[in-house]
Image: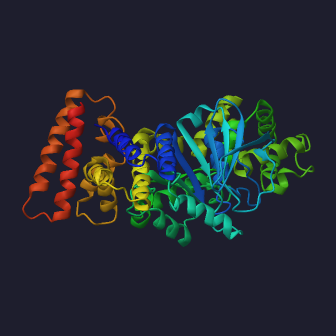
Amino acid sequence: MSLFGQVLQLLEIAERTYVGHPEATATLERIRVRMVEPLRVAIAGRVKSGKSTLLNALVGEPLAASDVGECTRFVTWYQAGGSYRAFVQRHGREAEQVRLIRRTHCVDVEPGGWADGELERIVVEWPSRRLRQMTLIDTPGLGSLSAQLGRSTEAQLLGEQDTSPADAVVYVVRHLHGSDVRFLEALHDDDVGRPFPVNSLIVVGRADEIGAGRLDAMDAAARVAERYRRDPQVRQLGSTAVAVAGLVAFGSTQLTEEHHRTILDQTRLDPDAAQMLLRSVDDVVDPAIAPGIDVARRRELLNLLGLFGMRLAERLVAEGHLSAAELATALRVHSGLDELQRVIGEQFVARAEVLKARSAMGSLKRLVGRFPPSSDTLVAGIERVEAGAHEFAELRLLLAVRGGGVRLDPTEEHEVEQLVSTIGLPAIERLGLDCGADPDLTRHELVTRIGRWRRRAETPLADPATAAAASVVARSYEGLLAES
């Protein structure tokens, strides 16, 4: 039986155990609902790291407010719905429906005026194909001017509640500061159900600013992300690091024919005027420069794409004579959004059942800690599933390898990374083979690897940690062989 099925069985045992216990019953109902809901992905980071812009880019619509000031003041959930609705939930109270207002650059709810910390969360239901795969949770920035806002994010993500809300975390940074590292270290402990390196990833947001808006800015940002991926300390905090120019990513989803015409007009300027126009933000909106292009149109494009995005769009159009649709696609690819969506799909969505089961296990453990059951059946069941779930063993193995607790050679470390970071994907991808590999070749490769890792586990000179790690890898391959 799959881990997901075993956890559902544990829920049934828990429901029988806590019959007549209102608080425990309510918690179990929340866990059960969560098991069948889309994966919950929290977007976190320091103030003005680009969290809300990134969320809008992932959804493809202007939902979360993003401006020069601190915008996200309440934990806000964006989830799929059959209609456009909003709810607010005060601490310890049922959710109340409120008015949802669609503004030009975001959605808002009324009435407003809530004090910091008054609301547990705001929920926005939005008909969206992308939200059917995952619910996105926008959080107030860490290091907020309001201590209450920062604490609300920490309380939610560090699991100080009965049910930690996030199955996975996208942590957005401009540069990785010591405070980011300390928060991520607190986020990743040994408590099953908390976010874990394999279901957390780091996004270098506002990546275009790293290169000061130059056309090679994304190359510079990609090098920063690569450095994070190679850093042993950072590798223990997130599965990978990706560079994304959030404003360009979101702007690519909102590009219109009118915006495209403005860019075409820019490409028709003489080289000196074109260079002067895109020299700075002030020059873009200076009516004395390129007077033939309406300043209001230029300002709108600047707000949509930023200076880097305008420079990039002009170059793409000049080089490829792209249509509006082709330009939007090219901007999205260059922004890093496609790569981020691919990583989220592989790291989070593909293993949604494992991540949700892990969250549910954490909630059950906290429940029995708060309300010890009269019989040992539930506790024994939790311990049995936790000890026997091979998926958990794989996750622990990855953390041990990244933390240096297991002595493997570089080739073996790479193999473990490939195997564990692709939990939930087909065998051919977990093996790192070409997608067109013959099934017989795949089975032969599995048999070869099982034999090699079994010998590694049984080597008399192997230390206990390495032998145990080799046994986990061999068992993983044996499971893949049984499924093939």
Of the pair 136 and 384, the residue shown nearer to us: 384
Q: Residue furthest left?
A: 460
Of the pair 162 and 226, the residue shown nearer to us: 162
x and y, in percent, of residue 363 in the image: 44, 53
Q: Residue furthest front?
A: 20
In the image, residue 442 sits, relative to residue 71, either above or below, namely above
Is 33 positioned to the left or the right of 416 in the image? right
Of the pair 273 and 413, the residue shown nearer to us: 413
x and y, in percent, of residue 329 in the image: 62, 34
Residue drawn at the location 89% of the way across and 43% of the way down: 296
Q: How is the image coloured?
A: rainbow
Q: Tell me if residue 271 can be seen.
A: no
In the image, residue 128 sits, relative to residue 277, either above or below, namely above
x and y, in percent, of residue 251 in the image: 70, 42
Q: Tell me if residue 109 can be seen.
A: yes
Residue drawn at the location 59% of the way across and 37% of the way down: 131
x and y, in percent, of residue 210 in the image: 62, 60
In the image, residue 258 sits, relative to residue 204, either above or below, namely above
Q: Residue furthest bottom?
A: 178
Is 408 positioned to the left or the right of 138 in the image? left
Residue drawn at the location 14% of the way across and 48% of the way down: 452
Q: Quadrant of residue 1?
A: top left
